[in-house]
Amino acid sequence: MKKSYFIWLAIYGVVWVFAYLAFPSGINKIQLTSMCVFFIILFILPITANKPIWQTILFSIQALTTIGVFHHMGSMFNPYVFLLHALIIAEAVFYLNRLKSFIVIGVQLICAFVIMMEANLSTTILVWYGLLYSLIITALFYFQTVHIRENELSKKYDVLLDEYRKMKRQLMIEEEQARLDERNMIGREIHDSVGHKLTALLMQFEAFRLNAVEQDKEKMTTLKELISQSLEETRKAVKSFKQPEVGGLQGIIRLIRKLEIESYMKIHFSVKHGAFAAPLSGEQSFAIYRAVQEALTNIMKHSSTREARVMFESPGRSIFRFEVINQTTSNYHFQEGYGLKAMRERLEKVGGSLDVTQDEHQFRVKGVIRLIERGGQYD
C-alpha cells in the first residue's frame, strides 16, 4: 500500500479540487466537517494496510461522508461525486476481497442513490449513470479477478523458486560429497597399491644394497633415495586428496589474500556486472579458481613485477568472463606450457575457452564460460 497510496492521494486531490470549484457557493459547516472526516480517513488508511475489516469500515464511512458534502444542494448536482464514488469502489476492489468489496459497493450505491434523488435528475440521466456504474463495477471486478490470480501465481512461483534453490543447494552438497568420496577412494587406492609397492621396493633395495659389491653401493644408494622421494611424494598426494577441495569465487578471494600476505604480491581485484550472482556450477567455479591460481602462480614464477590485476564480470548473466593481467617488459616472450594447456582443457570441459595474449606492455590471460539457463547442463 505504500507505493500506491501516494497515487491514490494525488488522484483524490485533483478530483476534490475540481469538485470544490463546481460548488455553486461556499461550503457550510456540515460539508466542511464531512470533507475533513473524508481526508482524515484518507490519511489513516495506510495504518490499516493489513486489517481488511477496518479498511471495509473506513471505505464505507468515506462513502457516507459524500452525502454530507453533496446533499442539500437542491436541484444542483455535482458530477464529480461520481468520480469520488468510483475512486472509493476502485480502492475497495484493489485492497479488499470480493465479499468486503460488495459491502463497500452496497454502501456507496445507497449514498449515490440518496444524492441523485435529491437532485431531481431525469430518468435518462439516471439510466446513463446506472449503466456507467455497472460498467465500472464490472471492469473493476474483472481487474480484481486478474489481480488475485496474479498474486496466487506469484506466491506459487516464490514457493517453487524456494524449492528449486533448496534442491540446487542439496544437489551441490551431494555433488561435493560424491567428489570428496571419489577423492578419498583414489587416495586409498594410491596408498594401498603404489605406496605399498614402493615401500616393498625400498626394502628390497636396502637388502640388495647390503649384499652388493662395493662399486655398486653408490648407485644403489642413489636409487634408494629416488624411491624414498617417490614414496614421500605419493604420501603428500594422498594427504592432498584427503583435504577438502577449495574452489569457487570465494576461494579466489582467499587465494588473493594469501598471496598478498605471504608472497607480497599487489593484486587489484575488481568485480563488474554482477559476477558474484552468476549461476555458475560447482565444476565451473572450480575451473575458474584453478585458472586464476595458475595465472597468478605463473606471474610469481616468471614475471619481473609482483603486481597483477584480476577482473570478473558477467554481462547479461549469459557468460562469465575473467581476466588476469600482468605488466611485462617488451623483451619478454612466453611459451605455452603444461599449466596453460591444462587450464584451457579444464575450461573447455565446462563450456568455456581460454585466450592468452601478450603485447609490449601486458600479459593477459582471459577466460570465458558460457552460462547455461536454469535446467541446463551446468545448473
Image (tube, grey):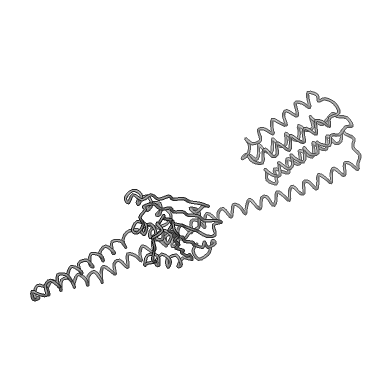
Residue that sits furthest to the front in the current view = 331
Q: Position of residue 302 (x, y in %)?
A: 35, 59
Q: In which quadrant of the rendered view does residue 34 lie?
A: top right
In-front residue for pair 130/361: 361
Residue 49: tell me if it is visible: yes
Label total for image: 0
- x, y (%) of residue 20? 80, 30
Position of 26 with respect to 300 (left or right) is: right
Question: Residue 292 is drawn in which quadrant?
Answer: bottom left
Query: Residue 182 in the image: x percent, y percent?
Result: 35, 66
Compared with 147, 35 (above or below) is above
The front one of 352 and 42 is: 352
Residue appearing at x 58%, y 55% in the figure: 157
Q: Which residue occupies 38% across, 49% down?
A: 266
Q: Position of residue 253 (x, y in %)?
A: 40, 51
Position of the N terminus by quadrant: top right
Report the front residue among 59 and 327.
327
Residue at the image point whose x is 48% and y is 66% from the top: 351
